[in-house]
Amino acid sequence: MALSPKILYDKDKKLVQDALIKFYTERPNYYGFCDTRDEEYKLYADFISLYADKGKHLDFGTGTFRIAKELSKHNFEQVVGLDFFSEEDKSKLNSELKEIENASIVNYKESNKIPFDDNFFNSISSLCVFEHLVYPEKTLVEMDRVLKKDGFLIIDCPNWSGPNPAITGISYNLKGKRFWRYNNIFDSFFAIFRSFYWYFLNLLSEKGKFIMIYPRMKDNEIDFEFSDDDVVHLCQPISIIKFMKNMNYKLIYCNSKTGRTAYSKLFNKLFPMLATSNQIVLQKQ
């Protein structure tokens, strides 16, 4: 019996990326443009403003006009929301922002290529995006290209590589339910041990090791049923931090105060590199 989730190897990355781009561009009604996350977007914008609150700001993988709208309240000269959109969606989202002079939505037409000049932005952020990147290293290099010296890179994403999703998976499996990609007790139980393997793999790696998996697919297309069935990058925080340190970035903050519940706050403070979710702030030197 094959373990789930399955590791994604280089030979299939192009196929998976094409499937994800098609899925995000078509953007079914049950995915994205969520009306119930306004408070989360506000907390996200508030967190970004702790480190960056002026100049030109890029929100990478913005998904909805609401993020750009929240960020526009924090004294940025310019806020750009970048994502895959149909022309109809882009027009709709920009119409929602027409009364806000410092915010706009831009289409991410060419994968792994941010459509702006070198050293253009003073800061870059992303919310719940890095888990969907087939080539996170290419995205980070592009972010570095368009970010000015001393600029901040702020990444907010779940940590699917840690032990907590697997522990949650066990409780779901005991009720006969699937949690994320953990289909059964065996998948969930083994994943607890595998999370520590991924942790030490990155801890001992010189440049960091991005852990990639197959999203849930059928007939070479995304088979989306539950939240984050489209995850492809497990976002082990050490991998991102080490990769950027090798590009001359300084770590400013990582996970020690992240969390919504008392359990997650305590766990993340004690074990930030195994955190329930990631908030990583890096500064370009």
Image: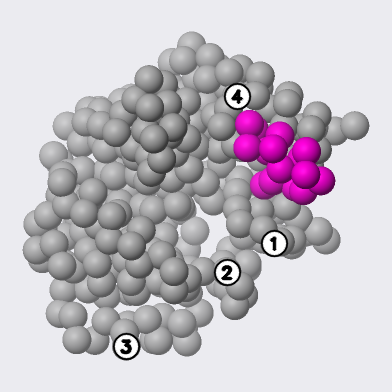
Residue located 49% across and 31% down the image: 236
Q: Looking at the image, do the residues carrying marks 1 and 3 touch, with CB atoms under 8 Å apart?
A: no
Amino acid on which disc 1 is placed = Phe
Is the residue 267 above or below the residue 213 in the image?
above
Q: Looking at the image, do the residues carrying marks 1 and 2 touch, with CB atoms under 8 Å apart?
A: yes
Q: What is the crowding at mark 1: few (fewer than 14 residues within 10 Å), some, or many (at least 20)?
A: some
Q: What is the crowding at mark 2: few (fewer than 14 residues within 10 Å), some, or many (at least 20)?
A: some
Mark 2 = which residue?
Answer: 31
Residue 120: x %, y % from top left = 19, 56
Mark 1 = which residue?
Answer: 224
Q: Quadrant of the C terminus?
A: top left
Q: Quick check: is 176 in the magenta stretch?
A: yes
Precedes in sequence: disc 1 or disc 3:
3
Range of magenta residues:
166-180
Secondary element at tag 2:
loop
Amino acid on which disc 4 is placed = Ser
Which residue is more in the foreground, 36 or 76?
36
Mark 4 = which residue?
Answer: 195
Amino acid on which disc 3 is placed = Ser
Drawn side of residue 13 relative to residue 110, left or right:
right
Residue 171: x %, y % from top left = 69, 37
Mark 3 = which residue?
Answer: 95
Residue 72: x %, y % from top left = 18, 68
Residue located 64% across and 33% down the image: 166
Q: What is the crowding at mark 3: few (fewer than 14 residues within 10 Å), some, or many (at least 20)?
A: some
Foreground tag (1 vs 3): 1
